[in-house]
Image: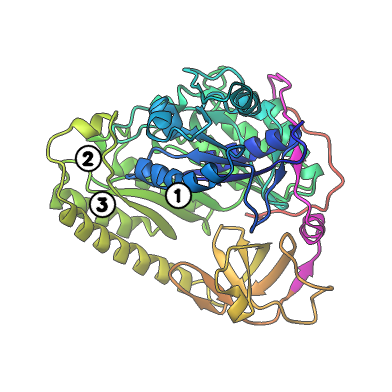
Amino acid sequence: MNGGKTYQIRTFGCQMNVHDSERLAGQLEEAGYVPAGADDAPDLVVFNTCAVRENADNKLYGTLGHLRPAKDANPDMQIAVGGCLAQKDRGEIVKRAPWVDVVFGTHNIGALPVLLERARHNAEAEVEILESLETFPSTLPARRESAYSGWVSISVGCNNTCTFCIVPSLRGKERDRRPGEVLAEVEALVAEGVLEVTLLGQNVNSYGVEFGERDAFSKLLRACGGIDGLERVRFTSPHPAAFTDDVIDAMAETPNVCPQLHMPLQSGSDRILREMRRSYRSSRFLSILDKVRDRIPDAAITTDIIVGFPGETEKDFQATLDVVREARFSSAFTFQYSRRPGTPAAELPDQLPKQVVQERYDRLVELVNEIAWDENKKLVGRKVELLVAEGEGRKDTETRRMSGRARDGRLVHFTPTGAAIEGSVRPGDVVETVVTYGAPHHLVADGDLLSHRRTRAGDNVEAGRRPRTDGVSLGLPSFGRPAPQPVATGGCGL
């Protein structure tokens, strides 16, 4: 045990990293560490890093440099670096920042407490990077960040070979969890009062290939529909090449699966998609969207788009704009191509000048915002059910609004007034209201609430409690209806 030593985790990157940080926190607290206060100097700082974005390494080493005076002033303080950049840079981190105590990779996040003790005992840095996954992260305890919404990993790694992406080399080949393990973790979260889960994988549509069930993901979605008290189910991210009709059917026919789809496009140019090794074409992508909207007319569809891939011409870029106009995304995560050493695309000729990429990026963002605003304006006057969130609205304090997520994932800022309110509205509660204004990135509902339901999740937020889940590893190979949990029911009512 560590006698109440304090810790702080700083997370960079994707949802995978955010969820890994929950596992790291769970292990540290099991080992006796406690979270550091906002104004306190922690005894341990853990960086969970990303290697996907440009300048990720400069950001890390700059931040490590800022910590050096604190380390010099308190030699007992420990600094650990994990995640994708650690997997990539390995011992280079200690060479460039010799005041770092521990470096660990994406395949051994469960080793952190042991490595910290070893570094303390030996008074030297410990660097441990495994080449493949030995223990699935779900077997580790987790301290969840949210009382009402939780990540549940269904797989790790990726079998795709996109030329711009470094993830497969850092997280390895896809490894799937058994359905029973996934459902047991979902049930454990619901038992703690969680209302919403997001099923997480680099490519959720290929889930089940490892154990030979091609329709495993659609079955998993339907099985989640049988968990009493689970009100909302989301998932990210699917791959267009592996997206099948049975998944669309499961989305449409399972009441608590939300009418939301995040489908990465990356480029609307078939030529660039070939260069990216994205095994679909724009017509295939748009046909999936048509099928989804046919079965789920109100579905909100979001995407990822990369601008400035090597060799992208103005014609290629115009093809992307054409797909964006036809797809009518409710929002898009837009990125300027980032040259990452170790990826095939980094060696391609015709790397575009920064000013060309920036100009195209600005035009894309303008179009995406214009379409999103048009789509959001159509929702004015519509009743929405919101799961009240904390920390989503940066201006909530000055506007006296609160914020929540609609079933389709849209962010809604609302006014917590009206006779329907029971006590006070808290994050984790569920409210209904009417949209009064649509902006490009959010909706506003300034009328009185139509209804307010207090929840166990809201009770937990109010009491400062966060779910803690033990590691789940049952090895169950098949689907079955989970045992009901005594939590209020609800759903995304497609």
The correct choice, above or below, for 310 with respect to 215 in the image is below
**Of all residues shown, which one is farthest toward the front?**
73
How is the rendered protein coloured? rainbow
Say what amino acid the circle numbered 1 marks.
His
Per the image, the residue denoted by label 2 is: 272
- Residue lying at 77% horizontally and 37% vertically, measured from the top left: 3
The picture quadrant where one finds residue 430 is: bottom right
Q: Residue 283's x, y, as percent?
A: 30, 43
Q: Nearer the viewer, residue 301 or 336?
A: 336
Magenta region, residue range: 451-478
Query: Could you tell me if residue 256 is visible in this image?
Result: yes
Per the image, the residue denoted by label 3 is: 320
Image check: 308 left or right of 207? left
Q: Secondary structure at mark 3?
A: helix
Q: Are marks 2 and 3 in contact (CB under 8 Å)?
A: no
Image check: 171 left or right of 482? left
